[in-house]
Image: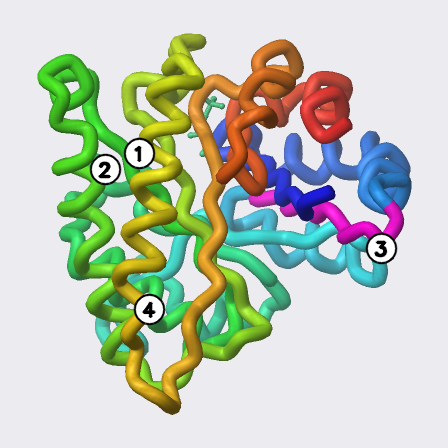
């Protein structure tokens, strides 16, 4: 039985107050969902809740000493300095986040992130022992004109280069790559398993090709793959059949506890 990661990306769907209310109302539900999962001996599944940044600290406090993990929805590509409105990876670590979503298509679009900036975030998170969840995905036009793989290549290459230039990649951190076709996010449209199977095999092969000749002294990162884009309780059963998928990044459906629970179960 493989370990699965279930990430609830609450985006900006709830205000600070609504987030606290929602998490308080479902505190016992989340805790029992996390602890009632597959026994550790068979590999423990993990649930990561990602509230918006203002709600991070109280949510971390609330779930402290439970099996629920908390992730940030963003971090800065910079380490320190005059960057109004940003928070560095160091702070993401210091307040107690285990994970951080980066390169989400909504953030790439809104903040005009370059591929290099996403790669910088990735490296800073690794430096501060936070598990990066880096999102990649193609537009509808790229999908329709069969340019999915070249779009993914463009997004992955700087990440791989950044990892290669790092001398130490701690083997206790498993970075995640989340394939989220942009046209699938919030639309109810999900690519067929054949397309997804092809894409996930391609990414897995890219990872092994990029790191098989990594020089001695640099650990080979154990990168795992997630799927995101209109995941529901109904389609998650089919999506779980895709061999290379190690979990889901869930947006809209994570706002309904019962729906999220069904996805996990
Ligand atoms: P939806 O599940 O709402 O399509 O969102 C997916 C997503 O963007 C998760 O990061």
Measured in 3D between alpha carbons, the distance from the residue under mark 2 to the one under mark 1, in whole angstroms, is 6 Å
Whether residue 27 sits left or right of residue 166 in the image: it is: right
Compared across the picture, whether 234 is left or right of 89 comes to right
Q: Which image quarter: residue 169?
A: bottom left
Q: Which residue in the protein does label 1 denote? A: 106
Image quarter of residue 84? bottom left
Image quarter in which the N terminus is found: top right
How far apart are the two marked residues, 4 and 1, measured between alpha carbons?
33 Å
**Who's the residue at 35% across and 88% down the image?**
216
Q: Which residue is mark 2?
A: 110
Against 167, is 14 above or below?
above
Residue 195 position in % (x across, y down) = 34, 21
Q: Residues within 10 Å of mark 3 (few under 14, many from 20)?
A: few
The magenta-colored residue range is: 39-50
Give the residue displayed 48% in from the left and 63% down from the top.
222
Q: Is residue 41 magenta?
A: yes
As rendered, which of 149 and 70 lies closer to the eye?
149
State which image quarter holds ligand 1. Answer: top left
Kindly identify which residue carries mark 3: 40
Residue ranking furthest to the bottom: 217
Nearer to us of marks 4 and 3 is 4
| Color encoding of the figure | rainbow
Q: CA distance from mark 4 to mark 3?
A: 30 Å
Which mark, residue 212? 4
The label shown at residue 82 is none
Q: Nearer the viewer, mark 2 or mark 4?
A: 4
Question: How far is disc 3 from disc 2 in space, using C-alphas?
Answer: 40 Å
Mark toward the start of the polypeptide (4 vs 1) = 1
Q: In the structure shown, which secondary structural element does the residue marked by tag 4 occupy?
A: loop
Q: Is mark 2 within 8 Å of ligand 1?
A: no
């Amino acid at each position: 039985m493989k370990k699965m990661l279930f990430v609830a990306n609450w985006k900006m769907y709830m205000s600070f107050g609504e987030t606290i209310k929602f998490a308080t109302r479902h505190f016992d539900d989340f805790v029992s969902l996390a602890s009632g999962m597959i026994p550790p001996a068979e590999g423990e599944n993990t649930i990561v809740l990602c509230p918006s940044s203002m709600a991070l600290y109280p949510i971390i406090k609330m779930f402290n000493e439970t099996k629920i993990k908390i992730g940030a929805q963003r971090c800065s590509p910079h380490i320190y300095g005059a960057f109004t409105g940003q928070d560095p990876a160091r702070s993401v670590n210091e307040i107690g986040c285990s994970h951080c979503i980066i390169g989400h298509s909504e953030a790439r679009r809104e903040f005009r992130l370059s591929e290099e900036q996403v790669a910088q975030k990735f490296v800073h998170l690794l430096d501060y022992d936070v598990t990066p969840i880096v999102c990649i995905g193609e537009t509808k036009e790229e999908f329709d004109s069969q340019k999915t793989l070249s779009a993914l290549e463009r997004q992955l290459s700087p990440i791989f280069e950044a990892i290669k230039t790092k001398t130490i990649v701690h083997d206790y951190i498993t970075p995640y790559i989340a394939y989220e076709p942009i046209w699938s996010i919030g639309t109810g449209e999900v690519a067929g398993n054949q397309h997804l199977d092809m894409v996930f095999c391609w990414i897995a092969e890219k990872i092994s090709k990029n790191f098989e000749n990594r020089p001695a002294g640099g650990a080979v990162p154990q990168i795992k793959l997630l799927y995101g884009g209109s995941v529901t309780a109904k389609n998650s059963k089919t999506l779980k059949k895709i061999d290379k998928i190690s979990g889901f990044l869930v947006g809209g459906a994570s706002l309904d506890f019962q729906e999220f629970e069904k996805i996990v179960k």
